[in-house]
Amino acid sequence: MSSPPVGPSYYADFSGLEGLKHGAKADDPQAIRAAAQQFESLFTSMMLKSMREAKLGPGLGDSQEGDLYQEMYDQQIALKMAQGKGTGLADMLVQQLTRNRAAQSGAAAAGTPAAPAASATPSAASPASAAVPQADRISFVRRLEPLAEQAASRLGVSSDTLIAQAALETGWGQHVPTAANGASSFNLFGIKAGEGWDGEAVTAATTEYTGAAPASVSQPFRAYGSVQQGVDDYVALLTRNARYQPALGTGENVGAFAAALAHGGYATDPVYVQKLQATVASVKALRGTAGAAQLKILAGLPTNDAGESS
């Protein structure tokens, strides 16, 4: 009898991470739990790093060597926290993954394909979208980076936040609303085609919430000729609509940005703020050298000495 998968007890235990990767692919419940805890530890370490970088200036005893050991210590502490009670993020990820697997299994048993997650709206995606291959997430981030940087400067927010919102809306680009002929709408931000929209539109399934109760519905979404047009329209929507004005100029404050959008009616998911915050942490890790290297190892991607994929 094979032994149950055990998550790494040390933050740089790459053999343990490799075991988690294979166990999670095999839908082993214990491996899925351990992988969720690993993601939570990465999220926590990013939070610790951000807090330490917020200090006013270097101390008298600070040094590069000291900073290195401090970062190593923070990552180990984050791993230990996640393997204990943690912040609750791992529990949320496990629940989401379990629901997705149950839905897919039920659809397979009925002889029909599982309906894709309606991640064209904020209420449709999980915080980590853990079913999406890591290589696809990295590719999504890199493709969207230049457009997100431009849009972020116009909105006064972080580009990480905009990339994360697009990832949350579309399941890292896997579920962009499409036309009946399969053509993409290039709608990465789940913008509905309301009465004031006179352009092209496509109909797609999405999840809306009434209170805490989710319901799958079909909605018309705006369609564009390119990703650039879609991003430009998203910026115009936020800057011209008075309901979303509080979201502008929020900078790195993801919570304020997400709360303002939710209050303005952009999202109906009751935990939209938490989901966007978790996805931003994932985006930051993918864009950061150390975080990207760790995630590529989890995904089985080759890396060179600089931490970039070869």
Image (tube, helix red, strand yellow):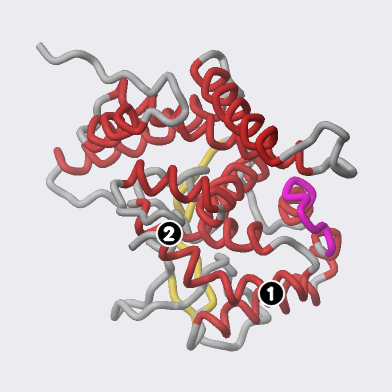
Q: Secondary structure at mark 1?
A: helix
Find disc 2 in the rendering and name its residue. 308
Location of mark 1 (residue): 151
Residue nearest the viewer, comparing 130 with 292: 292
Residue 48, quarter of the rendered image: top right
Q: Residue at x 62, y 28 (%)?
A: 74
Residues shaded magenta? 249-256
Q: Residue at x 43, y 31 (%)?
A: 12
Q: Position of residue 121 (x, y in %)?
A: 54, 58
Quadrant where the C terminus sits is bottom left
Q: Position of residue 60 (x, y in %)?
A: 88, 34
Looking at the image, do the residues carrying marks 2 and 1 touch, with CB atoms under 8 Å apart?
no
Labels 2 and 1: the sequence-earlier one: 1
Residue 303 x/y as whole percent = 36, 54
Give the residue type that dot 1 points to: Ala
- Is residue 84 a member of the stretch shown in magenta? no
What amino acid does circle 2 point to?
A: Glu
